[in-house]
Amino acid sequence: MSAEKIFIHGLGSSGEGVGKLDGLAVFVEGALPGEEVLAEIETRKKNYAVGRLVEVVKNSPERVEPFCPLYKNCGGCQLQHMSYAAQLKWKRQQVVDAVERIGKLGGVKIFETLGMENPLRYRNKMQFPVGKAMRNAQCVVRNDSGRGKDELVIGCYARGSHKIIDTTSCLIQNAGNDKILAAVRVVAKKFNLQPYDEDTHKGFLRHVMGRVGSNGELMIVLVTATKNFPNEKNFVRALLKEIPNVTSIQQNVQTFRNNVILGRDTKILYGKPTIHDKIGGLSFNISARSFFQVNTAQAEVLYKTAQDFAELRGNETIIDAYCGTGTISLFMAKKARKVVGVEVVSSAVADAKKNSRENNIRNAEFIVGDAVNVLPKIFDAGVYAEVVIVDPPRAGCDKKVLETFAAMKPEKIIYVSCNPATLARDLKILDELGYRTKKIQPVDMFPFTSHVESVAQIFKS
């Protein structure tokens, strides 16, 4: 297969270089804007093509040497070959392009991306799959550690596949998660725990999850395919010898044949059910299945931005429509009259109530239910909210939720987004419903990846 010379003029939403060949858009992973590259065309569709980078003929001044030896194979990061300053500019451009092309909105002020002073070791949560190092490399990509045939390996998935990169250290993970990874690997091999095979649906250990609290508390969650844990007590004792300062060891059972990491049932094998982390002077309980921002330092930047955009005077009632464990709700409660959080996951609401009590916050109320159903009832009961906060999953908001917001006629909507495309789509719907977006602040929660979070300030027209 011959290589084609392509000039790269931009980046795609996943951080891949974008060029043109015979009028067709070509996506080349690992290429940067301004570069001239040689690429082999691996896939050609009607509207686009995908090329494999063979050689960079002309380098971008923003190209840097990746700091991770596994980067070329690993799918955990997408932008280590790009300077951090350039990453921040590109992430802002992602938001600009989405607002203009998808949202069709003009006059929105989009600020420069707020980045980190030190963008390494920022992840407080690790979720690594477990597999075997097979000789034919069909299941696992081996690194230089010399793993033998059929040995247990733990790490990140390789790019675009479910092959596992055996990982001993990840430089975007908190160092505590590296310690967890090393300890579990040693003890799992000692007790011959069989890795789960997603093709045959056989085996025991599916994933290893690690969580690190702000004071160094460590939580280990072993995700297993069966409830029965062979030699459980001795396994826990051995694990404690390897990592004696651990706060919590838990087993999560995921029996379904799918790619969902965590199951519904969690069992405490040792220690406490939660660890703690702090954001803005507030302490939060984190359980195995709790949602909590993985970048604690940038979470404070994100929530402070949302608080500033709300422009609170102290007499407002706020509705937090996707409140989770109450992190944004409690952050806002410090400057508002009252906050009402709504969340469909009952366990998250229980955590939110506990977090409220432990932080001595008495002006926050939490309700279990779907925002589409709960918000009209709140409104009918006479609760008027000056500000609505929304922090939905990547899929964004259901149109009915946005229509419900508009029907409640708040003065402002503060939209916290982890996906520029769905943010822009929802801002367009809100615009049609009489709510104008004034400004957006991108925040880099995930350095060296293609992800960007944003906070949008939206006013009633």
Image (spheres, rainbow, N blue to C red):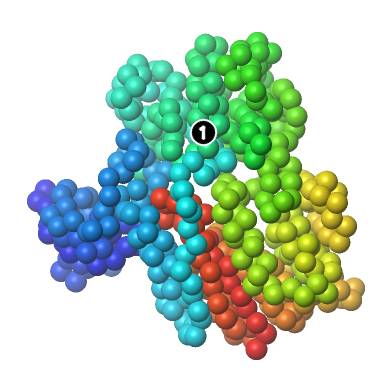
Q: Is residue 299 above or below residue 25?
A: above
* Number of marks: 1
Callout 1: SS: helix
Decide if residue 262 is on the left or right side of residue 134: right
User: Which residue corresponds to the image point at 30% horizontal and 41% vertical from the top-left?
Assistant: 72
- Residue at 22% x, 64% y: name it: 34
Question: Which residue in the protein does label 1 denote?
Answer: 175
Q: Could you tell me which quadrant the C terminus lies in?
A: bottom right
153 relative to 453, above or below: above
Q: Nearer the viewer, residue 18 or 48?
A: 18
Residue at (12, 55) in percent of width and height = 57
Crowding near the residue tagged with mark 1, few <14, some 14–19, many ≥20 C-alpha atoms within 10 Å: some
| Whether residue 207 can be seen here | no
Position of residue 332 measured from the top left corner of the image (x, y, whole percent): 74, 63
Q: Residue lying furthest bottom in this view? A: 461
Vertical relation: 445 (above or below) 436: above
Residue 300 seen in the current view: yes
The residue type indicated by label 1 comes to Ala
Q: Position of residue 212 (x, y in %)?
A: 61, 36
Give the residue at the far right of this rendering. 381
Rendered location of residue 397, percent (x, y) = 62, 67
**Is residue 325 toward the left or the right of residue 71 in the image?**
right
Q: Which of 281 and 7 is in front in this view?
A: 281
User: Measured from the top left, where is residue 131 in percent x and y?
Assistant: 45, 27
> Would you place residue 381 above or below residue 215 in this image?
below
Image side of residue 175 versus residue 302, left or right: left
| Left or right: 264 in relation to 23 | right
Q: Which residue is drawn at 73% across and 67% down?
A: 372
The furthest residue to the front:
117
